[in-house]
């Protein structure tokens, strides 16, 4: 029986290639395991991980990106979440009354992003407005889903609550009505944050194309509150975006910083003892004022040896004792042995 050496060599080569590939994959998995330092990440999981999983480690912790630091403290986040919940409750009541139908506003959380990244997320066209909220610094943004904006328009004009399929840019009349709706949302925010501070909302401008907005740098860190607004079976997104720096003037209100003492009680006691020893060894000027008299410069220039100065106070009047120029005690003049002395009789109250 004849054997085809060429086919045999080809099959053998294919088998070796498969073995080499398997060996290479095993080596890669071993390498990934050693680099992972015991986090037990599988190579397939690494290769198939989605973009949303990139910052989440296997133990559930988040990867820290020094290029985009998260500077929002837990207290600050909790306060803003409380504002968001209050906005949702107030908005539900306000718009239910406005539209004469059940309207719900649900707070869906807080997130951080840069201004440029946030603009990329916004659809075009949409409804987005720049507003001011002093004492918050600079301008903030209110974004209303365009379909939701047209739904508001139809309901205000007596129409039915049906999804809007033909989204387009606003006419001038529609732009004015939506500017009023933005003002209503900012007024709801004013009520929601009234527990912490008084804001005075102001309208800047409204655009359908988010690329026409200006006033913020691309890398500005933004804090975005997201809400879901539902009218009957139709729903849409509402967002309020603040520059992180906007809270600078009122940061202590939203994020009170309490001092944390890092020293132990023994260390604090030792520090006080050292300070006391240092003070006790420090020289201090102590003077006793026998009396005080007003005189002209001419009289002072005419003074000579043996002149007598007449003091207005009597001999039994207490003397003022000054410490570092500050009147601190009253005293009585006396003598100890051959030396004159002053006896302290009463400490003066500090102003």
Image (cartoon, rainbow, N blue to C red):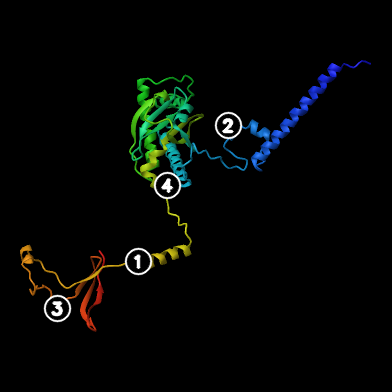
Question: Distance of mark 1 from mark 4, alpha carbons?
Answer: 38 Å
Percent from the top left, x then y, of residue 160? Answer: 45, 24
Question: Distance of mark 2 from mark 4, alpha carbons?
Answer: 32 Å
| Of labels 2 and 4, the one closer to you | 2
Percent from the top left, x then y, of residue 329? Answer: 24, 71
Whichever of callouts 1 and 2 sits on the residue coming sooner in the sequence is 2
Q: Tell me the crowding category of disc 4: few under 14, some 14 to 19, or many 20 or more residues within 10 angstroms, Cα based.
A: some
Taking the spot 41% from the left edge, 25% from the top edge, the residue there is 153
Residue where numbered disc 4 is placed = 255
Q: Is disc 4 placed on a helix, strand or loop?
A: loop
Residue where numbered disc 3 is placed = 315
The extreme front residue here reads 305
Residue where numbered disc 1 is placed = 279
Check the image and report above or below for 180 versus 197: above
Whichever of callouts 1 and 3 sits on the residue coming sooner in the sequence is 1
| Of labels 1 and 2, the one closer to you | 1
Whichever of callouts 4 and 3 sits on the residue coming sooner in the sequence is 4
Whichever of callouts 2 and 4 sits on the residue coming sooner in the sequence is 2
């Amino acid at each position: 029986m004849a054997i085809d050496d060429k086919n045999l060599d080809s099959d053998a080569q294919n088998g070796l290639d498969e073995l080499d590939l398997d060996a290479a994959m095993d080596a890669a998995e071993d390498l990934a395991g050693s680099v992972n330092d015991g986090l037990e990440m599988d190579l397939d999981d690494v290769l198939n991980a989605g973009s949303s999983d990139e910052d989440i480690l296997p133990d559930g912790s988040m990867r820290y990106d020094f290029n985009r630091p998260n500077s929002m403290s837990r207290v600050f986040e909790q306060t803003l979440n409380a504002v968001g919940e209050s906005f949702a409750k107030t908005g539900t009541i306000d718009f239910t009354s406005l539209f004469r139908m059940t309207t719900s506003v649900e707070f869906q959380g807080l997130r951080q992003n840069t201004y440029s990244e946030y603009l990329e997320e916004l659809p075009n066209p949409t409804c987005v407005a720049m507003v001011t909220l002093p004492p918050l610094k600079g301008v903030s943004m209110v974004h209303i889903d365009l379909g939701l904006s047209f739904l508001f328009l139809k309901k205000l004009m007596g129409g039915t609550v049906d999804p809007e399929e033909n989204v387009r840019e606003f006419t001038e009349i529609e732009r004015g009505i939506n500017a009023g709706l933005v003002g209503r949302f900012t007024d709801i925010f004013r009520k929601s944050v009234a527990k912490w501070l008084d804001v005075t909302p102001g309208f800047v401008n409204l655009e359908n194309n988010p690329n026409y907005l200006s006033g913020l740098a691309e890398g500005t860190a933004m804090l975005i509150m997201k809400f879901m607004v539902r009218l009957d079976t139709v729903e849409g997104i509402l967002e309020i975006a603040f520059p992180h720096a906007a809270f600078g003037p009122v940061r202590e209100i939203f994020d009170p910083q309490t001092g944390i003492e890092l020293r132990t009680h023994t260390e604090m006691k030792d520090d006080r003892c050292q300070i006391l020893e240092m003070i006790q060894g420090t020289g201090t000027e102590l003077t006793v004022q026998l009396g005080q008299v007003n005189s002209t410069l001419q009289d002072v220039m005419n003074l000579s040896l043996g002149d007598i100065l007449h003091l207005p106070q009597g001999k039994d009047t207490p003397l003022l004792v000054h410490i570092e120029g500050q009147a601190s005690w009253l005293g009585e003049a006396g003598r100890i042995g051959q030396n004159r002395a002053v006896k302290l009789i009463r400490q003066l109250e500090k102003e």
